[in-house]
Image: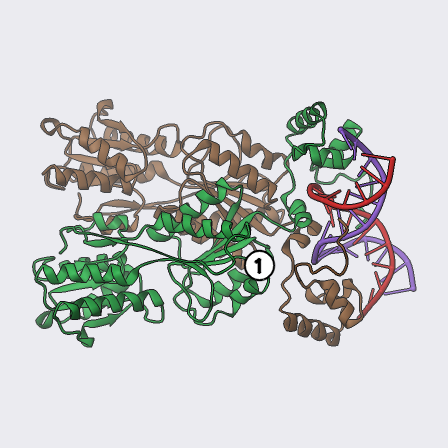
Chain colours: A green, B brown, C red, D purple
Amino acid sequence: MKRPSGTATKTEITILDMAKELQVSKSTISRALQDHHSIGAAMKQAVRDLAAKYNYQPNAIASSLSNRSTKTIGVIIPILYHYFFAAAIAGIEETAYAHGYKVIICQSGESYEREVIAARTLFSARVDGLIVSVSRKTSDMEHFKLFQDKNIPLIFFDRLPVGIESDSISVDDYQGAYKVVEHLVKRGYKKIAHFAGPLNITLCQNRLRGYKDALQDNGLPFDESLVYECGFERRHGVQTAKQLQKSNLPDAIFAVCDAVAVGVILTLKERGISVPKTVAVAGFNDDPIATIVDPPLTTTVQPAFAMGEEAAKIFFKKVDGKAKKPVKKILKTSLVVRKST
Amino acid sequence: MKRPSGTATKTEITILDMAKELQVSKSTISRALQDHHSIGAAMKQAVRDLAAKYNYQPNAIASSLSNRSTKTIGVIIPILYHYFFAAAIAGIEETAYAHGYKVIICQSGESYEREVIAARTLFSARVDGLIVSVSRKTSDMEHFKLFQDKNIPLIFFDRLPVGIESDSISVDDYQGAYKVVEHLVKRGYKKIAHFAGPLNITLCQNRLRGYKDALQDNGLPFDESLVYECGFERRHGVQTAKQLQKSNLPDAIFAVCDAVAVGVILTLKERGISVPKTVAVAGFNDDPIATIVDPPLTTTVQPAFAMGEEAAKIFFKKVDGKAKKPVKKILKTSLVVRKST
DNA sequence: CTGTTAGCGCTTTCAG
DNA sequence: CTGAAAGCGCTAACAG
């Protein structure tokens, strides 16, 4: 790629330019910039001054290529606009920044194809590690093998995949669900329905198990017809709540997440069904919307920010070579009782 | 960086490996992969097969360095967890992906320092363009000059900076505010307060002007003591609403955004003040939370997704060399009346 | 249609 | 303490 000399090119100041000006070699500039011990204080200062003068900004692309490390963590999540994920990302970013890493986020939009593309893109971008919460459409995990094969740290959070052995951080969904449902039973509700999430996702299976066991352990029958499978969005709660027959209402509903629970409350109220008098509703997440709905939602607190932090910490453990075996961490949840139950 | 031959290195398949295997040159592989016209169909197929066999993933770092283009757009926003920003990002991503670009997002967290760091980081990452919504703490715009100096497309959206000439996409905040307040006046409210955003932000100034003019054009006085400056978060609405004296309540409040409006409604209700009977409340954005609060919030629709799309479109116009002059686009808003007024 | 070759900007060994 | 030089993986102008 010979460039006709004399032609104006995009003027980007490089270490070579600075080297010429200071009459030293590139290496010296490079080392000075990295505060390498073998460079004299005077030289370092001169380089820093010059860099400041030209507002030099290192070319991260070039240095990544040379270093074979980008100092970035890739993150794939289903959707940004969910408090849980936004908060988890904040947690990841916080600890990444503290270690001098950047993070690059991709949304799968709950689409398997997008998730595959995102994984490839991030691999091509040569991220140093990948943190992911799988889409609800994902069952084939082949696209993650790329990372495992190359020994690139791969950490799953919240939505764990089946059929792939890897590091992960999640919450005790079983126990969380168990506690909400137990609370419902103790409040005297007898006919408790569950609006479950997509049951191909382990987390949803676990919440369902928690629901089932809590019923049975408390002397209530498990009735399959009271389990409705839906999605994670408000609109799924709305749809499902609309299907409920007024003549045959449950007296409480445990929804897989707060967004769904909110959809349920809104729809019930619209249909003239009083919450919690006629039907009580509980969710999962402790999304800020839980305190916006009327009545405020009983739910279980999922430590989103902490999960993000934890995921990033696992990454750094892997990078540092500690923890060779997959680490699988599970955080506890806690119940918040509000007026919806 | 000589590497002792024979030592196991991280096994990353490159075009060179494939070139050797097919007994052709790197260039041929490179061209075949890019579907270059000067490569025979047979050769192309052979290369594709081999690439598939090894699950070859191009090294984007290397190609960026060579191409002097990363095919990525950088985005800086104050905060992810706001419907408006999340939706705008979705709009940006959609159009970016359609053009084969990726996007990398940074949150400033409303901190000036973080914003500066983000700008530098994205510059170092050599993004091909930058789309930003400035933090509320930002008044110095020096960090954006980097991009302007190098002729890297720089597009501001929603929160426009003062003192820097650049492309932008925003909404007609003046008109939006005007319409809400006019609606309030027509509903018969007389003492209309405004919970304004940080007034160093132009968008907030514009909404304030709209408020003021709508009052005066409709024969109501502008009373400075009815303007409260607060932030953009729910908690700011809560704080400010708590300061209101019960003996001296306005009969309507126009909040700078829905999050604040929600804080106001919640607080008013908690204090036993009925909404909208005693005090009406209106917001701005049409965030989904507007339909969760009780009563549902009157607000003005800001086309968040479209703004993101538009911002990206401006970027591509710049890249294509069309549009040399700064393009400044302003979108219209529309009013949605709900039960809170 | 294909190969040779000179880079992209930075890092790092090795040899002073 | 400093410089020369090779190399990271890919691209593209130029010459067959």
Which quarter of the rendering shows the C terminus of chain B?
top left
- Helix, strand or loop at label 1? It is helix
Q: Nearer the viewer, residue B291 or D6?
A: D6
Does A72 sit left or right of A255 as displayed?
Answer: right
| Residue located 56% across and 58% down the image | A152
Does B49 sit left or right of B153 as displayed?
Answer: right
The kind of residue tagged 1 is Phe
- Asked whether residue A135 is in view, the answer is yes
Residue under label 1, please give it.
A123
- Asked whether residue A272 is in view, the answer is no
| Residue located 36% across and 46% down the image | B81
Task: Rate crowding at label 1 as few (under 14), some (14 to 19) or many (20 or more) other CA atoms within 10 Å.
Answer: many
| Residue located 28% across and 43% down the image | B258
Seen in the picture, residue B145 relative to A163 is either above or below; the reply is: above
Numbered label tally: 1
Residue A24, horizontal then vertical, whole percent: 79, 31
Chain assignment, label 1: A
Seen in the picture, residue A109 relative to A310 is either above or below; the reply is: below
Which quadrant holds residue A151?
bottom right
Q: Nearer the viewer, residue A258 or A27?
A: A27
